[in-house]
Image (spheres, grey):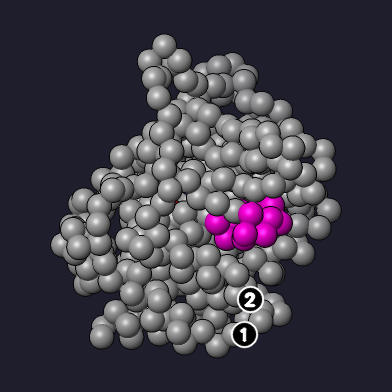
Amino acid sequence: MTKVAIAGSTGSIGRQTLDVIASSRTNDDCSYELVALSAHSSADEIISQARHWKPKLVVVTDPIARARVARELVGIEVIADLSELASVADVVVNGVVGFAGLSVTISTLKAGKRLALANKESLIAAGPIVAPLRAVKGAEIIPVDSEHCAIHQCLRSSKNHPGEVARLLLTASGGPFRGRTSGSLADVTITQALAHPTWSMGPKITVDSSTLMNKGLEVIEAHQLFGIDYHAIDVVVHPQSIVHSMVEFRDGATIAQLSMPDMRLPIAYALDYPNRSSVGFGSIDWSTLSRLDFEQPDCDTFRCLGLAYSAGRIGGTAPAWLSAANEVAVEAFLAGRVRWTQIASIIEATLQHHDGLIPGDVQDIMLADAVARQWARKEVSR
Ligand SMILES: NC(=O)c1ccc[n+]([C@@H]2O[C@H](COP(=O)([O-])OP(=O)(O)OC[C@H]3O[C@@H](n4cnc5c(N)ncnc54)[C@H](OP(=O)(O)O)[C@@H]3O)[C@@H](O)[C@H]2O)c1
């Protein structure tokens, strides 16, 4: 039995991970034991999840919610520290949103455990600190982000990557505003930005998809995960979200991974790797699939993509600044304080203040995140 802990079990990734485990149980083939769950402030949901799944450990980071959860869950340990998840599990699924997922990423790798990584922000912000931790005995990152999971699968066809890789092609749905011009996007509403055409996800990543910042963050994530230079990572818009990404090899062959948009497939892949899950998700009905379209991203309208490439190329703490500024800008957009078109401007203005700090340890990353947020908040209130 693989002991699984879920960081962010009340979110979109967390709930879908529970669904993967539940499906494997109904399939009479369950090889997972759910040992820990976590939430920030969704007390009712984590109480209900814990009553159903009976984990050993529940982590609740918001103090008021934690006190309530602890009162309700008799016989289950309820604590504040997300880093403890790795101490009870073989695999930790990091489904926390944003920089708050950093402690999960670091503690899991330090403990020499498998990290099923959905939380891209931790890798983007702390790439130089996370990289050496991958050498810890037993530590490994299996990506859950569908594009990186696809690339992970494509790379299994090569014994000698990255030497044989010509380029990575990350696919992007294009989000709800694909095809729109910047002039027509001035007054888009929160509801419109949250109406993703192909994926149902949490609010932050859905807004990131509408600005193409999600794809920009994924370009940096791909660089960190697979060690491929930025000039060999391209983005191609594919509105159907069926080709999840591709690898072009030196010999001209392109290998792609295809399935219907369903995050349970990459989650199950990350839990079961190197085996294939016995439960299927997202298989394609080829009798109804008639076309797959591809187009170039519009980098003039969706400026966040270019900002992410620039921050990735600068390296050091620039990706941490980019990601922190984006979190602040998206939060402000979702609170109705700034317009959608201001998200890119806030990030761009924040990055003007980047101090070029080269991170030596996790404290430097925390500092970079805090300073970038200060600048971004100033830009929001301007
Ligand atoms: N959703 C997808 O399909 C998808 C696909 C690819 C990658 N990802 C990545 O996966 C991550 C999670 O995305 P999501 O869509 O699942 O987000 P989500 O639905 O918003 O869920 C976020 C989870 O994180 C918890 N959380 C929020 N703030 C926290 C904090 N300060 N400390 C500890 N926990 C906190 C939430 O708890 P509460 O419920 O208590 O707030 C919730 O459990 C993101 O990094 C995203 O980019 C998601």
Residue 224 among magenta residues: yes
Question: Which x, y percent locates residue 251?
Answer: 74, 37
> Callout 1: helix, strand or loop?
loop
Q: Residue 326: tell me if it is visible.
A: yes
The reply, left or right, for residue 52 in relation to residue 64 is right
**Magenta part of the chain:** 219-232
- Asked whether the residues under the numbered discs 2 and 1 touch, taking CB atoms below 8 Å apart as contact, a structural biologist would say yes
Question: Which x, y percent locates residue 6?
Answer: 55, 46
258 relative to 361, above or below = above
Using the rendered view, name the quadrant where residue 375 is placed: bottom left
The mark found on residue 316 in the picture is 2
Task: Give the residue at x 32% y 61%.
Answer: 301
Of the numbered discs 2 and 1, the one sitting upstream in the chain is 2
Q: Residue 11: tell me if it is visible.
A: no
Q: Quadrant of the C terminus?
A: bottom left
Using the rendered view, name the quadrant where residue 328 is placed: bottom left
The mark found on residue 357 in the picture is 1
Task: Give the residue at x 72% y 63%.
Answer: 131
10 Å crowding of disc 1: few (<14), some (14-19), many (20+): some
